[in-house]
Image (tube, helix red, strand yellow):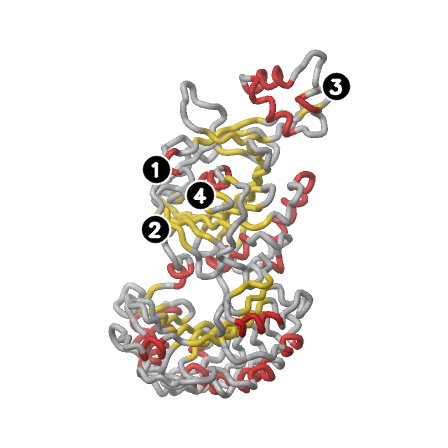
Amino acid sequence: MRGGKVWKVFGDRRSRAVGLACVILAAFFILLQPLAAVGKAGAEPEPDAHAEEVYFEDQAQRYPLLNELPEDSFGDYIALSVPRDKAYVVAMGDTLWGISGSFYGAGRFWKRIAEANPDSVGKDGLIFPGAELMVPQVCYVEKQDASRGGFSAPACSYDTPSDWLFGYPKWEVCLQSVYDSETMDGKVCAHITENRTFPDGVGEKWEEMQENIKESAGKAEGIRFSEPRFERYFREDGRELIFYSFIGETEEEKVQYAVAYVIGKKYLAEFIGDCLIEERGGQQTSAYAIEEITRYMAASFVETEEEKNWRMLKYRPYLGYEDWAYEDLHNPFAMAAELYGQVEDPVYEGEDQEVTFVSQEWEDLLRKVTAYHFDMTEEEWEDFSDRPLRMSDLAWITDVVMAESPIPGRDGVEINGLYPSEAACDDYKLTTLKDIAVLPNLESLKLEIGSVSDYEALAECRSLKEVSIVLWRPLKETDWLKELPQLEYLALRNSMFPHLMGMGYQKEGATTFDGEETVEDGDYVSEELGKVLAECRKLKYLELETEGMEEFDFIGQLPDLYAFRLFGRDRESAEAEERRAFFSEDAFPQVKCLTVDDKWLRNQE
């Protein structure tokens, strides 16, 4: 039972995956409003049929669409127009001012009609009898005074809910996340990129876009999607706002998703919101009206004439790009599958041998996370803890993190995202990587600890796809990399621990680093590394920190290399410029994302 003392030491992966790397407080106030929504594409706004059935725990976070402006209203409202099913036929004597007065109650809104009908309206609003005009149905959402400009950058701004925080999700470097800090049940991920996907707007491709989105929903694994609903608006600036929502469901969880795109003149903005749905009082309910919040954030998006400062740059294809028609947009179905999808454990193929460990502490950790993973009862745990571990017991483990940090409380100790609460790397006394090499299905490994140096043992981990090592001692032997046939991701960086300790730094609590400076001159990686990497033909991402490396012809032997990040020399030095000169515009065209000594030379963003 997970309520027992054995389980209380663990947190789960979702709190960290949804948890964010940096946090900035945003203070806003949201006005309570009744719920309304827009139906399927092309339909006029109408009350949401489910409005009375849904109970929202936090009634303050509401941004409903209103069919008309409240009387005696002095608030600031955003107008969103929706195409009508039937066109208006211009009669003799009609003017846009008069038509606007008939539909909107005021002639001053005539430009809405003109912008919606560029092929039928001439200069200064000239129209002719018999012309068919699309007169949009207009709905409104109140722009909250305290929420204006919740996120602001040189190129754009958009509003956010009150008291939500900013940060970046660990699983996607390009997304900015706005989330509720208390429950983590509601968040909206935002991304602003150049508008290369729809330079002329969605226009006639709207129906095709809906089919593409539905098709992608059927390709995600481990999660079912239902109740797709599409909406299309035109903002007052004439730009399109595309919106769709759906339900993601597994055997254990149900999640409401909402996605909005703003097709700007220069930039393409996307907002992807999700919120858990729970059973409360016999009703399906969520803590937030995530559809309203996501739509509102997109409606409030403002694009300026300034250039965007690309701080978070794309260094690999977006999650699920293979099953997605839009390269510059994230695949929300792949994101949902990553966070909530249920994937069957890999099985052990081979003779089921007993496993022995050098580190008793490491073995104890593997036992506890295994028992937690399989939700063992107290009786099952007693039997399991008394018998030897077997390879089949460890077959479910695919991801290991052992990364010590100089910052107190930042040590990473994770097994498939399960982590012991308040634990540090030194608590597990890992002295040899043979204790990790016994994991038969290990796919991802991140290491920064000073207690191991026998990386050659990793040659036994034939299923490894991602390896990230922050080096404490020089890595002179690299032939073991050639023994990893599935290797797609490799990062070799230098640890700050020897330099900090050389300056007298002492970490709070125990550490796996001994404090001795092991590198006086020279490099952390061998000169033969390039020859080894040339044989790692499946590499898609490569990150190296090396001062001495100058030959990069091996990149030509890596046909699938998407990103190459090279560090080690001072950004403004002549030596760094010499290395950059090696990478001309047409060199290694397969590399879409390239940075050399902290300067971006090529980027898919």
Instruction: Tell me where residue 147 appears, x and y as whole percent.
Output: 39, 38
Q: Residue at x 41, y 26 (%)?
A: 75
Q: Which mark is residue 130?
A: 3
Q: Earlier in the sequence, mark 1 or mark 3?
A: 1
Q: Quadrant of residue 20?
A: bottom left
Label 1: element kind: loop
Q: Quadrant of residue 5?
A: bottom left
Near-viewer residue (116 or 323) = 116
Q: CA distance from mark 3 to mark 2?
A: 56 Å
Q: CA distance from mark 3 to mark 4?
A: 43 Å
Q: Earlier in the sequence, mark 3 or mark 2?
A: 3
Q: Quadrant of residue 563?
A: bottom right
Near-viewer residue (273 or 253) = 273
Q: Residue furthest front?
A: 574
Instruction: Tell me where residue 570 appears, x and y as whole percent.
Output: 48, 71
Q: Which residue is mark 2?
A: 181
Instruction: Tell me where residue 584 appears, x and y as whole percent.
Output: 65, 68
Q: Which mark is residue 29?
A: 1
Amino acid, disc 2? Ser
Above or below, comparing residue 482 to residue 36 in the picture: below
The reply to whether residue 489 is visible in this rendering is: no
Label 2: element kind: loop
Q: Which residue is mark 4?
A: 290
Question: Split into 4 quadrants, where in the image is the N terminus?
Answer: bottom left
